[in-house]
Amino acid sequence: MLTNRVLVLLALFTCLAGASAVVAQDEDASKAIKAEEFIKERPASAKRTPARYKPASKSTGNAATPPPGTTFAQMGVTFWRLRKSTVADKTKELIEDEEGTAVEWTPERIEEGTPLYPGQKVRLGIESLSRPGYLYVIDRAQYADGTLGEPLLIFPTLKTNDLNRVKAGRLIYIPSATGKFTITPSDSTKNHVGELVTIIVAAQPLVPSDQLASRAIRLRRQQVESWEKQWGATAARFDMDGGVGQAMTEKEQAVGSDKSQELTQDDPPPQTVYRLATKPENPILLNVQLKFHR
């Protein structure tokens, strides 16, 4: 009798556990968002991408409406890590190695927060999914003690000033469509653990064009901190399901270097979408991180 009772209890527990797993899966599925929700402002196409997004963490909200006095703004960001090309890759870039030999590399998608090793090459793709405006990108070194380095305006420069008008479908690559950042932690006394990249989309220019230079310019720390205080908002993050490791497509490669081309609803969406509740009159301000593996 005791054995039979044990078997019955085990069977009941197994059924309950299975039911709980199904409920958890259903809850995860209910939080998923179709890509068309994020890229609906892109130019229309004959068909739409089937990609789906899931919250990056359980704490990421999926509220249908923003708080009173605010509207949702959505920013798409794709972190591209360059790897050695394979025969099957359709997109390849020639980059000279330390010995001056041209080697083929292909950009592939990674998630924000992926540890990056010294020497690795990365590029950021940015798309303002819900608001047109002027794009500004600021870079600051991050240290283990929580402090930040001096803010550098890395986009736009004099060379890229005609590219900083953005809208849905207009993909901007940082540092450029053919450029890349090579991960090189500084040798300072502080422990350099990454870079904090601040992305701003404003309705009006923030930096006069006559103040730009051919390279990055230093901004006043107080100015950037003031912008963060005025316009900063907590971002809900959504990652494209199954996107990590996908190579850059030919369309994504072409649209970054050809201002006349735009991404449509049929083209790949960003790897990550950040949703912020902001006042309509305020610029969008978003901080993302490049983390170093030491």
Image (cartoon, rainbow, N blue to C red):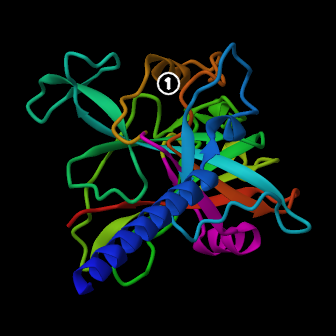
Q: Is residue 64 above or below residue 273?
A: below
Q: Is residue 139 above or below residue 119?
A: below
Q: Residue at x 90, y 68 (%)?
A: 68
Residue 212 in view: no
**Viewer-side residue, 275 vs 283:** 275
- Residue lying at the far right in this picture: please name it: 69
Task: Give the quarter of the figure containing the C terminus.
Answer: bottom left
Q: Is residue 27 above or below residue 175?
A: below
Residue 177 in view: yes
Residue 201 position, x and y percent, is 71, 49
Q: Residue at x 49, y 58 (%)?
A: 22
Quarter of the image holding residue 107?
Answer: top left
- Mark 1: amino acid: Glu
Q: Residue at x 27, y 55 (%)?
A: 116
Task: Give the quarter of the figure containing the N terminus.
Answer: bottom left
- Residue lying at the far left in this picture: please name it: 99
Q: Residue at x 28, y 52 (%)?
A: 183
Residue span colored magenta: 216-242
Residue 153 position, x and y percent, is 55, 54
Pointer 1 residue: 252
Left-right relation of 255 to 141 = right
Residue 103 position, x and y percent, is 17, 24
Residue 74 position, x and y percent, is 69, 49
